[in-house]
Amino acid sequence: MLKKSLAFLFMFILMIALAACGGDEETTDDTGTTDDQTEDTSDDGASEGEGAESSGDGGTVEIFSWWTGAGEEDGLLALIDLFEEQHPDITVENAAVAGGAGTNAKAVLATRMQGNDPPSTFQVHGGAELNESWVAADKMEPLNDFYEENDLMDKFPEELIDMVSKDGDIYSVPVNIHRGNVIFYNMEVFEEHGIEVPTTLEEFVDVLGQLDEAGVTPLAMGDKEAWTATQIFENLLLATLGPDDYRALWEGEVGFDDDRVRQAAEYFETILGYVNEDHASRNWQDASQLVGEGEAAMTNMGDWAKGYFSNDLDLETNVDFGYFPFPGTTEDFMVITDTFGLPKGVENPETVKEFLAVLGSVEGQDAFNPLKGSIPARVDADPSKYDEYGTDTMEDFQNSNLAPSLAHGSAASEGYLTKANQEVNIFVTQQDVDQFIEKLQQIAGDL
C-alpha cells in the first residue's frame, strides 16, 4: 500500500509541476488567489497583548499557503497578528505562493516535501488531498495527543474530524469551513421578474427558463479553470444521489453507471444551456461580478464569493444579493475545509504546535474567518462576529448532512480529480452524456 501511495505521489508531483509551467497568465483559485506576490509580513516588533505568553523557545514558524488574494490574505494576516501578539518570541515567515489556482503552491510544496525540506506547516484541504497524498506517503505527524491536550475533540463535528483522520489518527487542524453547494443571486433581478427561490432541481430548471425568456442570463459560470464546472456537477450528484450514496460513490460502493449519475449528467447538460456564452474566458470572480451588476441572475460558487460580493463589490447581504442551497441539497452541506498539520522532519515541532493551537482556538478562528468569508470550523465560535450569511451558514453546518467536495480535493484523490476536471471540461464543450458517463467509469479506478 505504501509503495502504491508513493508511486501516486511522485506521479502527482510530476503532474502539478507540468501544470505550474503552463503559462504566466494571471489566474485565481477557489479562494481568490491572484498572481500578485505577497511580501513577508512577519513583524518582529509586534506588541504584546493581554495574556501574551509563550511556552515555546522562540524560533521561527513558516506558514505555507496560497492565500494572497483580497479577503483571504487579510484573514491570514489577522491570524498571524494574533499569533505574534500571543507569542512575541516566535518569528513568523509568511510563505504564501500565489497563482495557478493553488497549483503553483502545491508544486512548490511537493518539491520541498520530497526534498526533505518541509515548511513548518502548510495549507491543505481536509479529506483525500490530505489523507491520500501526504498522510499515505508517511509525511505527516499524528496530532491525537495535541487534540487531547488542547481539548479539541468535542470542538469540531465528528464528521469533520473524520475528514482529517486516517486509520484512527488525526493529522491536521481545520481553520475554516466553506460551503460549496450554495447559489448566490441578485435580489433585484429576482424581484423584478417575480422569481421564487427554487428548492428542487425541477423548480431550478423552471426558474432558468423563466429568466432566459425575460432576457436575463440565468446562471453565470466562469470555467476558465475547470473546477468551477466540476463544482456544479458535484452538487448535481449530491442532489440526485443523496448524501449517503454520494459518499458511497467516492468509496466505490456506488458505480458511475448508476441511473442517478446519468440523471445528474442530464441535468448538467440542461443547465449548461442557460449559462453565459463567454463562460470559458471568465474566472469565478468575473462570473460573480455579472451577478453583482445584475447582468446575470445567479451563480453557483463557494462562499468565498460572499466575501467577494461584500468586500470587493461593496454589496449588502440580503439587500443586494441573497443565497440559497443548491436545489435538491437543502438538507446537505458540501464541505470545503482548509487545514494545517505538522509535517515530519521539521526542526521545531513544539513551536509549530503553538501556531496550530492559536489557529484552532476560538480567538484564532474568529480573527480569520470574518475576513476570509468563511465560517469557523469550531462549533463554539462567537456568532456575533459574523453577519447574517455567516450565522445562517454556521447553523446549517451544525445541522446538515456533511458531504466532501470533489472539486476541492476532499472526496477523491488528486489523480482522479485531475482527470475528472478534464472530462467535465470536455463535457461542457461537447455535452455528450453517454461519452461523459463512459469516461467517468473508466477513470473510477483512480479514486
Image (cartoon, helix red, strand yellow):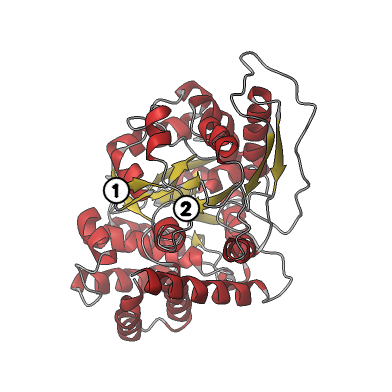
Q: Which residue extends farthest top? A: 50
Answer left or right for 99 relative to 412: right
Q: Is residue 373 visible?
A: yes
**Where 20 falls versus 182 (above or below)?**
below
Answer left or right for 63 relative to 124: right
Q: Tell me the residue that label 2 is attached to.
A: 140
Crowd around label 1: few <14 · some 14–19 · many ≥20 (10 Å): few
Disc 2 residue type (three-letter): Met
Classify mark 1: helix, strand or loop.
Answer: loop
Residue 117 location, x and y as percent?
63, 58
Residue 277 location, x and y as percent?
56, 72
Disc 1 residue type (three-letter): Gly
Of mark 1 and mark 2, the one earlier in the sequence is 2
Q: Residue at x 66, y 34 (%)?
A: 80
Q: In terms of image quadrants, where is residue 258?
A: bottom left
**Where 146 falls versus 261 (above or below)?**
above
Calculate the distance from the C-alpha at mark 1 to the C-alpha at mark 2: 14 Å
Q: Tell me the residue that label 1 is attached to.
A: 168
Q: Is residue 314 visible?
A: no
Find out whether the residues at labels 1 and 2 contact each other: C-beta distance under 8 Å: no
Task: Classify the position of the N terminus by image quarter.
Answer: bottom left
**Where 35 falls versus 320 (above or below)?**
below
Of residues 158 and 366, which is closer to you in this image?
158
Of residues 432 and 322, which is closer to you in this image?
432
Answer left or right for 247 relative to 416: left
